[in-house]
Amino acid sequence: MRLFKDYLARKTMLGLSFVPGLIVLLMCLGLFLKSRPILAQKSFFSLLFSSAWSPLRGEFGLFPFIMGTLWVTFVALIMAVPVSLLSAIYLSEYAPRFIRESTKPIIDLLAGLPSVIYGVWGVLLIVPFVGQVLAPLFGVESSGYTILAGGVVLAIMIFPTIISVCLEVFTSIPYEMRETSLSLGATKWETVRYVVLKKGLQGIIAAVVLGLSRAFGETMAVLMVVGNIPRVPKSVFDSGYPLPALIANNYGEMMSVPLYDSALMLAAGALLLVVIAFNLLARFTLIRVERKAE
Amino acid sequence: MTLPLTKRRSIHRKVEEGVFKILMVASMVIVVGCLVLIVGTIIWKGLPALSLSMITQTPKGGYYLGREGGILNAIMGSLYLASGATLLALMFSLPVVLFINLYNKKNSRLAEWTRFSFDVLWGIPSIVYGAFGFLIMIFLGLRASLLAGIFTVALLEFPIMSRAMDEVIRLVPRSLLDASYSLGATRLETALKVVVRQCLPGILTAVLIAFGRGIGDAASVLFTTGFTDRLPTSLFQPAATLPLAIFFQLGTPFPEVQERAYASAAVLTVMILLISLVARGLIKKSTKHIIK
């Protein structure tokens, strides 16, 4: 009886272990099936590169939204990468033990704060700051609801991802290597630059890619501060309209306009594919890095 | 008066070291400062607007125009939703994590693939979960309801919870398992009576992390859970959620209602802080009584 129970549990658990992989496949399949109606009418590339967006006339050019996403992500990365990389180096190489221990909860908390909270904060602080301080400084008129505001909020949101992956990468570098470099008379920074960064380069790239894919899909926080005007942005002081915001904003009306839901599901599917591709790339790199370390 | 070359180089090296050290400390201050700034701003703006009626009443007529009422509907809705989703996610993730750690050899191919698909799932943005949940909902002929929301959020929490759990269960020492097997226990008995007990605080932490994520996520419930001013009484009714309540209140043009959005944001922030405090405490406890 006990053995039978064990056998039963074993089979159920084995079955359940396929669930996560299955979900990924189902998601791709479901979104693809749903976006087929629109793909049957228009070619994939004409949808991606057309700027005409007026669902009522059946025009679904996703180009402005793709550009919006790229701009916001790019701005966020420019700000987030140096800060998180330097913090990660500090935490892994320089910081005394108690600082390292006490910053971990802070980074976890930063990762755990809901995106709506980031959004509210952005509206309260970043949007007025961009609109009233930064924009006049550069001599432009701006409401503050801009790509720049979205980028700043997003940058803070991806700090934890980049920092914690970088930390993992740095700890996987053998200590002996650093000791060798130090014993040859290199300063601590030189050791970091020529040993840690060089050895960890692939891992760092993987960390950045993971941060990038986080930024790509972030919805609510960006939606609240970025302005949502469906036009291709020309500078960081323009409003943008990223893909996830498009999906989130139009869920109400998408069922009443023909092909609208199909177009939005296509957007979601495209987002999913890009994010999965980035994740696969980063994870494979990380696994390789780990293997090498062993 | 020029210094010898080696001397100059050594000064140069020291300066470089110093400059980068300052930069590093500065970045660290930025990261920590951001958290303090965010939590500080939300609490500072939210607390003055918070009142007892806000968290004990449901919205009355014209609430979104600045009249009487509160956000009890959203608070309760979020709690129902996150509890249901967390329970559902736990039912799937605990067996999977136990399986890849006990039944399989720790680094078998299946275990590796499962971990890998968790990683991929973890990276999928919540709006895509929302769209997917919406598709399933349509497919099953459901309307936007608490049930559909629970299902979607459970999907979202599944990888988060499993990854956190896997990290703890992976660390169970081989010798402990061997001891249990040698006493004649089957794998299932070992899993439930030894491993789960040994890792209980860690498992609870994983559950809490997932719960926090579920309570705060807006993009995935936007399509699936709907929004209503009443308290949900059955699984098939739509339910309000706190993040969406914040979003909608902030979106109104009335300053009084926006004030309430800040207050609601403060409520949500305090909830998240509490959850992570408890989780922290559990981690501390978990390292105390564990057989190493």
Image (spheres, coloured by chain):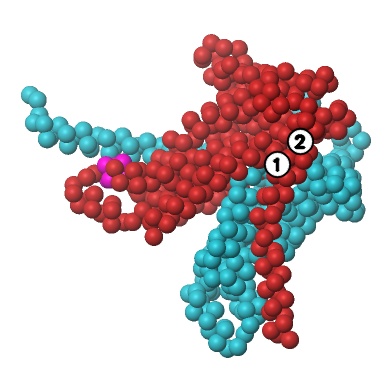
Chain colours: A red, B cyan
Identity of the residue drawn at 50% across and 49% down: A284
- Please tell me how crowded label 1 is: few (under 14), some (14-19), or many (20+) other residues with Cα within 10 Å: many
Where's the N terminus of chain B, which quadrant? top left
Vertical relation: A174 (above or below) B243: below
Residues in magenta? A188-193
Vertical relation: A252 (above or below) B94: above
Q: Which circle, 1 or 2, is nearer the viewer?
A: 2
Q: Main secondary structure of the magenta part?
A: helix
Residue at which label 2 appears: A35
**In this orientation, which residue lies closer to the viewer: B21 or A208?**
A208
Q: Residue A48: x and y, percent? A: 67, 26
Residue B128, numbered label: 1
Left or right: A176 as drawn, with respect to A63:
left
- Which chain does tag 1 point to? B
**In this orientation, which residue lies closer to the viewer: A253 or B206?**
A253
**In this orientation, which residue lies closer to the viewer: B35 or A1?**
A1
- Amino acid under label 1? Val
Left or right: A68 as drawn, with respect to A162:
right
Marks counted in the figure total 2
Identity of the residue drawn at 63% across and 82% down: B186
Whether residue A9 is visible: yes
Whether residue B256 is visible: no
Q: Residue A192: x and y, percent? A: 31, 44
Element assignment for label 1: helix
Left or right: B48 as drawn, with respect to A254:
left
